[in-house]
Amino acid sequence: MGERLRFIICTPRARVVDERVDSVRLPTGSGQVGLRPRQEAFASGVEPGLCLLRKGGGVRFAATAGGLLQARGDEAVLYTPFAAAGDRGEEVLAALSHVLAMPDSELTMRRRLGELEQRIVHELSQGPAAPRTRGRHG
């Protein structure tokens, strides 16, 4: 048995996935991203859609409403407002479609949270800000 990546999906209400996998593929704004053990640290926004978790020759599915991915070394954590996981892709996508179709204020708040996460990722990718200096008066 080779190295494994610990992949975690957290929602505000539960930890939907917490497993050791061989690899993960998930949707981002710039296309599909693959995760494997011993990767460089990075953060990325994740788009709503289907994640593929490969483990021991099998595939497990997780559908998410988008969110923020933080990955480093042998662990990756996806923070999302909603997620469903299972062995059948059609079922987890149906659960996601049902939630995204709900026109309620909580879902609107979750979308705004996603926009905020995108801005955070953008700012983090810009690198450290230059220190501000204050002039002395007097």
Image (tube, grey):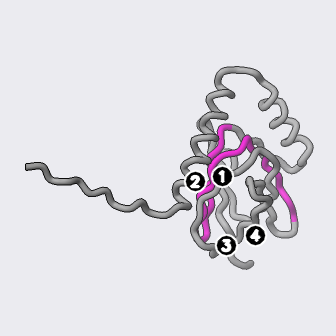
- Amino acid type of the residue that numbered disc 3 sits on in the rendered structure: Pro
Which region is colored magenta? Answer: 58-81
Magenta region includes residue 67: yes
Give the quarter of the image for residue 95: top right
C-alpha span from label 3 to label 4: 7 Å
Of residues 130 and 106, the one nearer the viewer is: 130
Label 4 sits on residue:
22
What residue sits 58% from the left and 53% below the top?
121
Per the image, label 2 sits on a secondary structure element best described as helix
C-alpha span from label 4 to label 2: 26 Å
Is residue 105 placed above or below 7 in the rendered structure? above
Which quarter of the image is occupied by the N terminus? Answer: bottom right
Graded by Cα atoms within 10 Å as few (under 14), some (14 to 19) or many (20 or more), the crowding at tag 2 reads some
- The label on residue 54 is none
Marks 4 and 2 close (CB-CB < 8 Å): no
Magenta region includes residue 78: yes
